[in-house]
Amino acid sequence: MRRLQRFLRPSRPAHSQCGLLLGRDACRVDLRHHQPAGTGGPQSRPGFRPAPGSRRVRHALDLSVSRRPEEGGGGLVIQKKLEVVYQPFDKATRVPPGTTLFSAAHWIGLPIDSTCGGRGTCGKCKVQVLQGGAEITIADRKQLRADELEAGWRLSCQAKVYDDTTVNVPALLRVPKAATMGVNRLVLLDPNVRKVFVELTEPSLEDQRSDIERLRDALTAEGFDMKADLQSLRALPATLRAAEFKVTAVLGGDQLITVEAGDTRDQSYGIAFDLGTTTVVGTLMNLRTGMAEAVRSTLNGQAPFGADVISRISHGMQGDAAKAELREAVLATMNGILAELYEAAGVGGDRVYEMVIVGNATMLHLLLGIDATPISMMPFTPAFRDPLYLPARQVGLDIHPGGFVQTLPVIGAYVGADIVAGVVATGLAREDKLRVFVDVGTNGEIVLGSVKRVLCTAAPAGPAFEGSQIRCGMRATDGAIEGVTLSDHVELQVIGGDIAPKGICGSGLVDTVAQLRLVGLLDASGKMRSREEVPEHPLSDRLIAIDGVRAFLLAENVYLSQRDVRELQFGKGSIATGIKVLMDVMGVKTTDLDEVLLGGSFGSYLNPESAKIIGLVPPVDVDRILSV
């Protein structure tokens, strides 16, 4: 014990191979390289990461060292780390006592759902403790039913480990249902990336032009200007000679991206990314044909840090390490999508030369490692609004390192490049028709206008449309109810086909409320009827009470409560108010509207009739409500 205590003295060299991390209230021995102060400590990463695929983690020194508060000074208490096993993944890690099940799972990359950033308010991160036990917390009692608590279910973000523990994690697919097709518009194909095949004359004693002069002269003869950076120059001599001076020059505008051996003009690709707060969608585009070769989507890897942008910003305010964590999470998400796109299309990343990214201002800031804190504070100022055109090697995304990453312009702190992309795609600002375009989601954005004038605003709708704050809510993955029809019986449309419903996603939520209103089980204020009030109704047996709150049973263990209806009303009210404000400012009425456009991964699957019934959109004819 004395020898170990001497080893733990803070006077030891800070940057040793066997680093020592000492916190104010706890310390631990870490066999990894020491992390400098401010980049994470015992509270942020208390466990070792296992090698990929490893079932158990073992270390030569498997101890947790904490200070024991005592009068007149403190000693050190040596505690053995505890094993946590996650089923059905059959993965395990070892953590110090007091670590939450959510944190331990996050460190080894397990997909436990969460939309509140681990604050115990969304109820989505529940796991079933099979062995070891975990005390019931106040948050558990608020978010979980009595029978769930009895069966060992706990909120993983609140459940702390004090014994070796085994838990069961409910299935959560990482790929949500998202919009993969947009507006079909005829556009002139004029990509910024050009590929020019040239056959150069070889150097001789009579022609001693440099390699770059030789290439520039050939491109000038073809009508192209060119400038080269250092990376291109480094690769040029070897490429020219290996290809016998028959090469394809790849240009991004007038910038030389690379020179490829032979004629590769038929291999030219770009990537379009919709970087959403919840869902990220990537599309691989053929720049020669203008056609999409592959589309993939997944959940934003930043989700464990919170469902909304304010939660993400709050996490980043904890320091540089937290900002880096957010950036690394979204980069991993996007690079994972890129790998899937390349495999699906049989394309190499070295043939992808340009990427365009749209998203709200916060998502773009976090991706680029720019401090987003001012966005959350008066007067809500982003670091940039102009479009950015950046070298790919600076961003960290897996396309050709000489290529470029472009972001569309941001209008304001809460009106981002995603809504700008929607305006461009729909041609809203180029046509005479007066249209309102709504990007429905947690960070809702609205545009009203025509070729004459365009107005926009933000209308944060909260997380209800993403399934958060809804008792049986979930994201749009397999098992989610996405459509509901009520008559004398209940018809459900479930993502994934013929499988048992697990919860209800945003489109299913809107459908359910609209249908309950149509069949008379909700009044105009949104109040749900009780079974006693409508005993003769064919669906009265589905009117139940959960912990004293009225609810409608959709399927076994899946229901919509009165509180859920109120949550939807808050979100709906925000968007409806935003639309009304824009219409009032422009001085137009509902009868003046030619179309209502619903965008975003959620809006694309929303039933227009249901959106109209609940008052989410203006009361125009249903055939004028379009999903884009």
Image (spheres, helix red, strand yellow):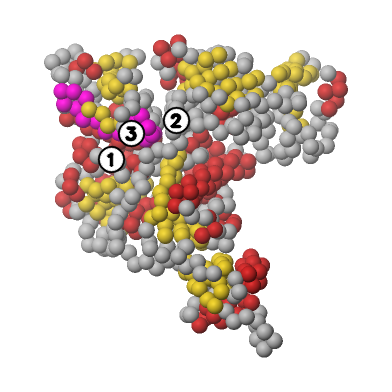
Q: Amino acid at mark 2?
A: Leu
Pick whichever, 168 or 107, lies toward us. 168
Q: Amino acid at mark 3?
A: Ile
**Residue under label 1:** 606
Q: Which mark is residue 495?
A: 3
**In the rendered structure, which disc, 1 or 3, sits on the residue that comes first in sequence?**
3
Residue 350 seen in the current view = yes
x then y, percent, for residue 279:
42, 42
Helix, strand or loop for disc 2:
loop
Helix, strand or loop for disc 3:
loop
Give above or below for 136 relative to 475.
above
Number of marks in picture: 3
x then y, percent, for residue 109:
56, 33
Q: Residues within 10 Å of mark 1 (few under 14, many from 20)?
A: many
**In the rendered structure, which disc, 3 or 2, sits on the residue that comes first in sequence?**
2
Query: Residue reaching furthest top?
Result: 150
Which region is colored magenta?
Answer: 475-490
Q: Amino acid at mark 1?
A: Leu
**Residue under label 2:** 172
Give above or below for 481 relative to 189.
above
Residue 453 seen in the current view = no
